[in-house]
Image (tube, rainbow, N blue to C red):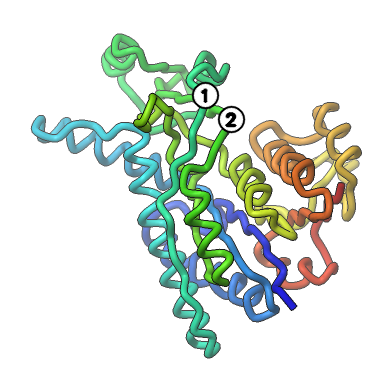
Amino acid sequence: MSKAKIVVSLGHDALGYSTNEQLGHVKVTAKALADLVEAGYQLTITHSNGPQISMIHKAMTNLSKEDPSYTPAPMCVCSAMSQGYVGYDIQNALRSELLSRSIPKPVSTILTQVTVDPYDEAFYEPNKIIGRVLTKEEADAETAKGNYVIQDRQKQYRRVVAAPVPMDIVEIEAIRTLVDADQIVIACGGGGIPVIEQHCQLKGASAVIEKDAIAGRLAAELHSDMLVILTGVDQVYLDFGKDTQEALPELTARQARAYLEEGEFGKGTMAPKIQAALTYLAAVPSGRVLITSMSLIRDAIRGKGGTVITA
């Protein structure tokens, strides 16, 4: 009997917000992932990288100010660097946890590129804050270079980049080959490295891709049996944070879409996860989506918690 294939999407809580935090968090995350492996699931893992890519971008920018022989790293390079070191920590922590349970299973990280449309509307209305706070002079210099800068709620100048819709996963065949060989794969980290196809070349884009969006696409491409989205809450809720808050243990795709269109889910929080679920279920109607927290995953995967969305 073949194993059930699942794509697991890890949020910020699974990784922490600094290099030291990450080392501690991935040990906890590895135990939860190992539980799934031990339960007989075949895993493909993707993860967020917001704090990590921002940290790298800040470091490279500051280095270039101290030593002009260095240049600030483009967003695509920062994305690649964050994919590499986050994947490195996850794969080593998971490998160690599996070996402690006498499960000698290979864990690999694939540096993954994802194509985006250069005419995506997101490039005309960037909204993802990246990097450090800028001075007025620095903000003017960024604007002069053609980059986008906004003033946040504290009236501080911040650079923003686009978050276009992911199109094709460039390394999907390599990922699929390892999955079919029953190996654990970490791929599309941070949404993948955004690239634009130009004839035979792939050019890095000044953008980031929503990790939830690519999780839905990855699960669809692999025809996974389940998409598991781990986040900071145990379930999906209506009226989240209000006195009238109501947990939703089960949803159909139609119900989820209706609530999404009514604005029930936070634009930068739950809404992208619901959209990822709909993307996946449209491609794999027989699949299931589970949205829950890291602490509840062991019970939720057995139907004792979380929110399950089906077609």
Q: Would you say residue 132 is visible in this rendering?
A: no
Dot 1 or dot 2, earlier in sequence: 1
Q: Is residue 96 left or right of residue 278?
A: left
Residue 2 or residue 149, whichever sits in front: 2
In percent of width and height, residue 199 lies at 38, 25
Q: Would you say residue 198 is visible in this rendering?
A: yes
> Are the residues flagged by discs 1 and 2 in contact, CB closer than 8 Å?
yes
The residue at 80%/28% (across/down) is: 263
Residue 5, quarter of picture: bottom right
Question: From the viewer's perspective, is the residue at label 1 or at label 2 nearer?
Answer: 1
Residue 248 or residue 2, whichever sits in front: 2
The residue at 50%/59% (across/down) is: 186
Q: In the rendered picture of this protein, how many numbered marks are placed on residues?
A: 2
The residue at 65%/63% (across/down) is: 294
In percent of width and height, residue 249 lies at 88, 55
Q: Is residue 256 left or right of residue 94?
A: right
In percent of width and height, residue 101 lies at 55, 88
Residue 241, quarter of picture: top right
Residue on which disc 1 sits: 117
Label disc, if present, on residue 199 of the rendered structure = none
In percent of width and height, residue 268 lies at 64, 34
Query: In the structure shown, which secondary structural element does the residue marked by tag 1 occupy?
Result: loop
Residue on which disc 2 sits: 165
Query: In the structure shown, which secondary structural element does the residue marked by tag 2 occupy?
Result: loop
Which amino acid type is marked by label 1?
Answer: Asp
Which amino acid type is marked by label 2?
Answer: Val
The residue at 69%/31% (across/down) is: 267
Q: Quadrant of the N terminus?
A: bottom right
Q: Is residue 21 above or below residue 77?
A: below
Q: Is the residue marked by circle 2 packed among few (<14), some (14-19), or many (20+) residues within 10 Å?
A: some
